[in-house]
Structure formats: C-alpha cells, structure tokens
Image (spheres, helix red, strand yellow):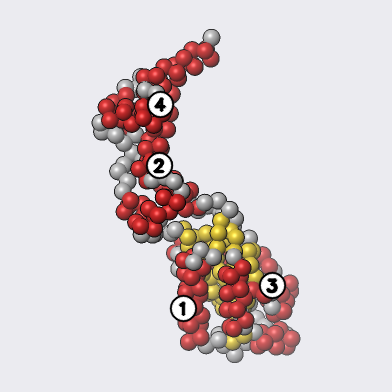
Amino acid sequence: MKHVVLNLILSAKAAKIIDSFASLMKLRIVFYSLDGKVIKQSRNEGNSPYCRLMQDEIFGIERCLKLDETKHRECRESQKIITYKCHAGLTEVVAPLVIYGDVVGYIICGQFRMSDAIPCFIKDEKLKQLYLNQQKLDYEALDNILEMMKMLMEYITEKELIATEIDYRMMKIKNYIDTHYQEEISLNTLARYMCCSESTLSHYLQNHDTTLKYLIRDRRISAAEELMKNNADLTFSEIATMVGYNDSHYFSRIYHKHRGITLSEKKSRFYNKKKIKKS
C-alpha cells in the first residue's frame, strides 16, 4: 500500500503528554503529518532565537526545510527513529508515528547541542552566545530521550490517542483485499499485515457488523460483475476462477444468495443495457 496522507487529530491527553515531555527535557517538540503539516508544537513554541537568526542571515530556511524533508523520508522508509545534525550544528531527532504498520506522521525533538565546541562557521559573538544558550545534552541523555520517544510513540498509538478523519484501519483492510481477493486470505495473514492479533482484528470487524469472509466475498462478486460487463465472451467458470473460486457451481450459489439474482440474469442485464445504448 502506498503512503496515504491523512488528516490526523491529536487528543488533548496526547497533547498534554507532549507538552510535559518537552517541558521536562527543556526541548522543542513538533508533531507533523506525513505531508509536513504541523499538528502540534510543544507549548506553542517556534524556533529558538539561534535557529531563527541562522535561517534569516546565514543558511536560509529553504536549506533547513530540504534537510527536514530528507530526514522525514529516511524515517518513513526505515520506520525507525533517526538522529541527525542540522546545518546550524544542532542535533535533532525524528521519530515515526506508525499506525497498523504504516507511517502516518512524525515527531521531531530537537534544537539541542552535544558539545561546547563552537561550529567553525560561527564568527559573530552574538551567534556564539545564542548557540551556547541552546540546551546541551550528553550521549547518555540522548539515549534516554530516544528510549522515551519510542515509548511515547508506542503509547500514543496503543492507547489510540491520535485519530484520523477516515477509518484508516478499514481502508487498509479493504486495500489489502482489493489486491489479494483472488488468493486465499486467512484471518492470520491479514492480522500480520495489519500488525495486530487475530482476536483484535476479529473484534474490530465484529464492531463494524462485518466479517473477513463477507468482505472477501463482496469484493469477488464486484470483480465478477466487472468481468461480465466488459468481457461478454467469458464463461461463468472462467469468471469464477479469475475472482478466486475453484468451484463455479459454488460461486453461482454464492452470487445468487448475495445479489438475489442469478449470474445469467445479471449478464443479460448488462447485455440489454448495451443494446439500448447502441440503439
């Protein structure tokens, strides 16, 4: 499944956790959607005076945005927390927000330095002081932050403290079925794809008044109707095989039960509609 940009909704509890984490560590944390839209900034903070000056007078903001985009992509592709040094000599951390096996957003934690050494490009005394005013961390503290960020992301997703405007879980299930409906799809296979247990998946489907068996059958029937509509020469046995049924008689019974008409009746309707359009 290709990456889908979702409108994410952060709960008040998650926002409070992020603010508390940022205040405790005296760091800036920004929550981004997959397309780079800011969802939440810790304590509504912007960039530090040092970063603003570097962007305005030294490097330019475009260079920062390009680096952020590159690191976001690396984070998305690896689905791992990434640590990197920006052009201004500060260290930042980007962590992926993963829902049902897909990255849907990021948390960036940063604007801290790992050393007292002044970067060689800083000559101005004001810039030097602004750099030294940045929060300093040692490598032990950085390791602790990485572990805390990992736990934070896992907690947010496990407790479902972030939501989407669409039912992303159902969308992903249907996308998988769209791709694999011609094959045998077990609950175990789909659960592994969704990064959840079989019981969790089964419970979710029950809450939506459906089953995996129904969703597969509905998709196969829709595919069969498309084949009948566009390929008048195909036999029902050929269509059944093409949509995942080895027994054409069983498929005929399933179709009649599901649609309330026979395959022959449905095919005749398609044929009659074409005759009307031609006349």
**Residue 250 horizontal/vertical position (percent):** 28, 30
Looking at numbered disc 2 in the image, what kind of residue is underneath it? Leu
- Residue highlighted by disc 2: 215
Which residue is at a point 33% across and 31% down the rendered structure image? 254
- Which is nearer the N-term, disc 4 or disc 2? 2
In depth, the one of 256 and 15 nearer the eye is 256
For the residues marked 4 and 2, what is the alpha-carbon distance in whole angstroms? 17 Å
**Residue 47 horizontal/vertical position (percent):** 68, 74
In depth, the one of 146 and 153 nearer the eye is 153
For the residues marked 4 and 3, what is the alpha-carbon distance in whole angstroms? 58 Å
- Residue highlighted by disc 1: 147
Looking at numbered disc 4 in the image, what kind of residue is underneath it? Gly
For the residues marked 1 and 2, what is the alpha-carbon distance in whole angstroms? 39 Å
Figure disc tally: 4
- Which is nearer the N-term, disc 3 or disc 1? 3
**Residue 15 horizontal/vertical position (percent):** 61, 70
- Residue highlighted by disc 3: 44
- Residue highlighted by disc 4: 260
Mark 1 vs 4: CB contact within 8 A: no
